[in-house]
Amino acid sequence: MKPWLDLIQKLISGDAPPPPIAQLIGFGVSEAESGRVVVTFEAGEKHANPMGTLHGGVLCDVADAAMGMAYASTLSEGETFTTIELKINFMKPVWNARLRAIGQVVKKGGTIGLVECDVLDEAGKLVAKASSTCMTLRGDKAEGR
């Protein structure tokens, strides 16, 4: 049983409320299967940095959400996770655009996993590439997370 995947699919169908960070930034989940999640995001003026382009931290958060949900979608009952490393490369500036962040589990070991994310614009051009190392938590370490 994959309870996190079930929850993510309920986010898509509207049967579960979006997490607060999704509401704050304005992203949503459009696709989910075990090990792969697509997050969509409409970048606009309210997400701009002082130079007028999409703030890198917002872009990083959207990628982190896609990667985190992709990893969570592989977890079993009683498991949670934490991110232990995150890296992002920004490939081109964004102003106003509809973006897709595609999070994909590359390798899930017994405790440590690697996840990647491509963030694409409407034309399918690479805006950013991110990677994350996640650690699965079980038992007492998973409680309250």
Image (cartoon, rainbow, N blue to C red):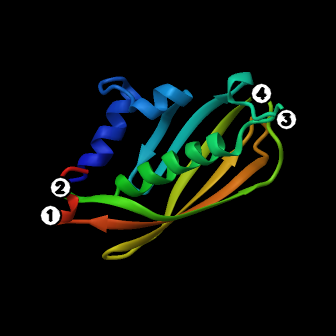
Place residue 117 in its image quadrant. bottom right
Place residue 80 in its image quadrant. bottom left
Q: For mark 1, give the secondary structure.
A: helix
**Could you say which disc has been placed on residue 140 in the image?**
1
Crowding near pointer 2: few (<14 within 10 Å), some, many (20+)? few
Residue type at mark 3 is Met
Residue identified by numbered label 4: 96
Across and down, in percent, residue 38 comes to: 53, 43
Disc 1 to disc 3, how far (Cα)?
Answer: 45 Å
> Contact, CB < 8 Å: mark 1 with mark 3?
no
Q: For mark 4, give the secondary structure.
A: loop
Q: For mark 3, give the secondary structure.
A: loop
**In the rendered structure, which disc, 3 or 4, sits on the residue that comes first in sequence?**
3
**Could you say which disc has been placed on residue 51 in the image?**
3
Q: What residue occupies the far front of the structure in this picture?
A: 50
> Contact, CB < 8 Å: mark 4 with mark 2?
no
- Position above or below: 28 against 101: above
> Contact, CB < 8 Å: mark 3 with mark 2?
no
Residue identified by numbered label 2: 143
Q: Which of marks 4 and 2 is in front?
A: 2
Disc 1 to disc 4, how far (Cα)?
Answer: 44 Å
Q: Nearer the viewer, mark 1 or mark 3?
A: 3
